[in-house]
Image (cartoon, grey):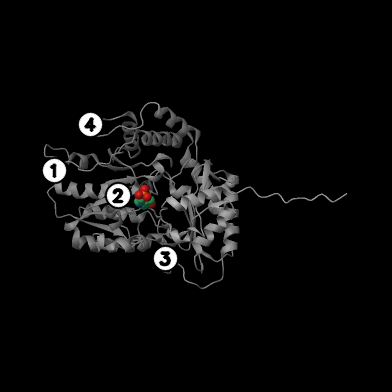
C-alpha cells in the first residue's frame, strides 16, 4: 500500500492582513508616519469587551492605554450600551441653539454639582482641542467684556500639550506636533514645567513646584496687563511622557492668577474623570480654575464630546443686549444628545461602582507589582498618579517606542510608549488578574526590547507620533 500523503494544512488567510491593506489604501491614519505602515501595520480591531480588544484573526490585546486615554469602564459596557440604545430611539441629535434637551441639561447640572457649583455653566463641543479653543476665546472675551481688551496673550507650561488645532497648538510645547506649523501660530509665553523628575539633589517635588511657580510669578509681575490666562494640565502632563507634579503647583498658580488678575484654565481633558484618583485633578490641590476643559473620558470613551465649565460670574459677563458681548462660537454637533447620554451613563457608573475608591486599590496593586518587577531593570522614575503608572527606560536605543509597541502586541498588549517613557493607563474596570497579566507582559516586553544600544532616542511625543 502506498503511504498516505499528509498534506500540510494551509493556514487560513489572515483577515487582519486584508483589513490592513485596505486601510493603507484609503485611510489616512493620525499621528502616524505613513512610511512606517509597512513595518507597523495598524491592528485591525473587530470588537472590544471590557479591557480587551479582539482583532479579526481572533487574537486579543489588553487595552493598556485605554484607547488613547478615553476609555474608563471598558469596551461595550452593558450599562452605557443600554443607555445609548434607549437614547437612540428618542433623540440622536438636535441643534443646541434655540433648542435644548434632557441629556445636555442633566449632564451640565451633574457636572456643576460635582464642582460644588463653583463652575456653574457648561459649554459643549466635540473634541478636546475645541474645548481648549473655547476656553482661550472665552477668557479673552470675558476680559474684553470687562473693559480689559489689552489682555490678549496666554501663558502655557513647557512641554505641555493642549491639542492640535491652531489655537490649541499655540499653547502646546511638544516640538513634533508644533514645529511644522510654527509659522501659522501665535506666540504664547512659556514657563517652566513643575515636572518632579527635574528635582535637584535634596529637592522634593514641592520644591520643584515652588521653583516653577516663581518663574510664572516673575512673568505675571511684568506682563499681567496683557495676559488673559494661564493654561495648565493639572497633576500630570500626559502627552509629554506622563510628567507628574506636586499639587502645590496648582495652589501657587491659583494664588498668582488671583493676585495678578489672570484667568486659570485647567485642561483636564486627559486627567479629569477620575484618572488621577479624584474626579477632577484640581480637587487634590483644593482649588477651582476659572475654566475647566473636559473631553476624552467624559463619554466613557464612546463618542466625541468635550466641554468647558466656567464660573457663573464669568457667564454673567456675556449676558447683554449687544451681540458682540455674547460668546460667538458654535459647532454643529455641540451638545450631541447621544454623547451627553453616554456621559450621564458614565457618571452613573462612578456612583454605582464606587469607582474612585476602587481605582485607588487597583492603582496600588499596579504600582506595587511594577515596583517589584522592575527591580534591577534599566529604568528610572517609576511614578504613579491614580490609574496612571509610568517609568523611563535608560538607553532605550533607536525606535524604542515602535519596537516596544510591536513586541507588546506579540505579548497581547496594546501600548504606545512616549519616547523612552513606558506608561500603563488601563480602563478602570481592570481586574486583579488582568493587572498581574498586564504587568507581567509589560516586563516580558521590556526584556525583549531593552537593547544595550547607545543610539539616539527621540524626545517627548516623537516616538508616540511615529510608533
Ligand atoms: C488629548 C488632549 C487634548 C486634545 O484632545 P483631542 O480630543 O485629541 O483634540 C488636549 N489637552 C490634553 C491635556 C490632552 O491630553
Q: Which badge, 1 or 4, is on the more N-terminal residue?
A: 4
Q: CA distance from mark 4 to mark 2?
A: 24 Å
Q: Secondary structure at mark 4?
A: loop
Outermost residue, right direction? 1
Q: Which residue is mark 1?
A: 324
Q: Which residue is mark 4?
A: 98
Label 1 crowd bin: few (<14), some (14–19), many (20+), radius 10 Å: few
Q: Which badge, 1 or 3, is on the more N-terminal residue?
A: 1
Q: Secondary structure at mark 3?
A: loop
Q: CA distance from mark 3 to mark 2?
A: 24 Å
Q: Which residue is mark 2?
A: 132
Mark 2 touching mark 1, by CB under 8 A?
Answer: no
Where residue 281 appears, as percent x and y from the top left, is: 38, 48
Mark 1 touching mark 4, by CB under 8 A?
Answer: no
Tell me the tag on residue 213.
none
Q: Which residue is mark 3?
A: 459
Mark 2 vs ligand 1: CB below 8 Å? yes
Choose mark 4 or mark 3, whichever is in front. 4
Q: Which badge, 2 or 1, is on the more N-terminal residue?
A: 2
Amino acid at each position: 500500500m502506498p503511504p498516505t500523503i499528509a498534506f500540510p494544512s494551509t493556514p487560513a488567510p489572515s483577515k487582519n492582513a486584508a483589513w490592513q491593506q485596505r486601510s493603507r489604501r484609503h485611510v489616512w491614519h493620525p499621528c502616524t508616519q505613513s512610511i512606517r505602515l509597512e513595518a507597523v501595520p495598524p491592528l485591525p480591531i473587530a470588537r472590544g469587551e471590557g479591557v480587551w480588544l479582539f482583532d479579526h484573526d481572533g487574537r486579543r490585546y489588553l487595552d493598556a492605554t485605554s484607547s488613547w486615554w478615553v476609555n474608563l469602564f471598558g469596551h461595550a459596557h452593558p450599562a452605557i450600551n443600554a443607555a445609548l440604545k434607549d437614547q437612540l430611539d428618542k433623540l440622536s441629535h438636535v441643534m443646541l441653539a434655540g433648542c435644548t434637551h434632557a441629556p445636555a441639561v442633566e449632564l451640565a447640572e451633574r457636572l456643576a454639582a460635582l464642582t460644588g457649583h463653583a463652575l456653574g455653566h457648561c459649554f459643549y463641543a466635540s473634541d478636546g482641542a475645541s474645548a481648549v479653543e473655547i476656553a482661550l476665546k472665552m477668557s479673552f472675551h470675558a476680559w474684553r467684556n470687562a473693559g480689559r481688551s489689552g489682555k490678549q496673550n496666554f501663558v502655557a507650561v513647557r512641554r505641555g500639550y493642549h491639542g492640535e488645532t491652531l489655537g490649541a497648538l499655540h499653547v502646546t510645547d511638544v516640538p513634533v506636533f508644533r514645529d511644522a506649523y510654527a509659522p501659522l501660530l501665535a506666540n504664547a509665553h512659556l514657563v517652566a514645567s513643575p515636572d518632579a523628575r527635574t528635582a535637584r539633589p535634596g529637592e522634593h517635588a514641592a520644591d520643584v513646584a515652588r521653583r516653577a511657580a516663581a518663574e510664572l510669578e516673575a512673568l505675571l509681575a511684568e506682563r499681567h496687563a496683557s495676559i488673559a490666562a494661564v493654561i495648565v494640565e493639572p497633576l500630570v502632563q500626559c502627552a509629554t511622557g506622563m510628567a507628574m507634579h506636586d499639587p502645590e503647583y496648582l495652589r501657587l498658580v491659583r494664588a498668582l492668577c488671583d493676585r495678578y488678575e489672570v484667568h486659570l484654565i485647567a485642561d483636564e481633558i486627559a486627567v479629569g474623570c477620575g484618572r488621577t484618583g479624584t474626579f477632577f485633578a484640581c480637587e487634590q490641590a483644593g482649588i477651582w480654575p476659572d475654566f475647566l476643559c473636559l473631553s476624552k473620558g467624559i463619554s466613557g470613551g464612546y463618542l466625541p464630546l468635550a466641554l468647558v465649565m466656567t464660573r457663573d460670574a464669568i457667564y454673567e459677563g456675556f449676558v447683554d443686549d449687544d451681540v458682540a458681548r455674547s460668546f460667538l462660537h458654535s459647532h454643529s454637533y455641540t451638545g450631541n444628545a447621544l454623547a451627553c447620554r453616554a456621559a450621564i451613563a458614565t457618571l452613573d457608573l462612578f456612583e454605582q461602582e464606587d469607582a474612585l475608591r476602587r481605582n485607588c486599590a487597583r492603582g496600588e496593586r499596579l504600582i506595587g507589582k511594577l515596583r517589584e518587577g522592575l527591580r534591577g531593570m534599566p529604568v528610572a522614575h517609576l511614578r504613579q498618579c491614580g490609574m496612571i503608572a509610568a517609568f523611563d527606560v535608560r538607553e532605550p536605543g533607536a525606535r524604542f517606542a515602535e519596537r516596544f509597541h510591536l513586541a507588546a502586541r506579540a505579548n497581547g498588549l496594546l501600548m504606545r510608549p512616549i519616547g523612552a517613557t513606558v506608561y500603563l493607563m488601563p480602563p478602570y474596570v481592570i481586574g486583579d488578574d488582568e493587572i498581574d497579566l498586564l504587568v507581567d507582559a509589560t516586563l516580558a516586553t521590556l526584556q525583549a526590547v531593552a537593547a544595550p544600544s547607545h543610539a539616539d532616542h527621540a524626545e517627548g511625543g516623537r516616538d508616540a507620533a511615529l510608533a
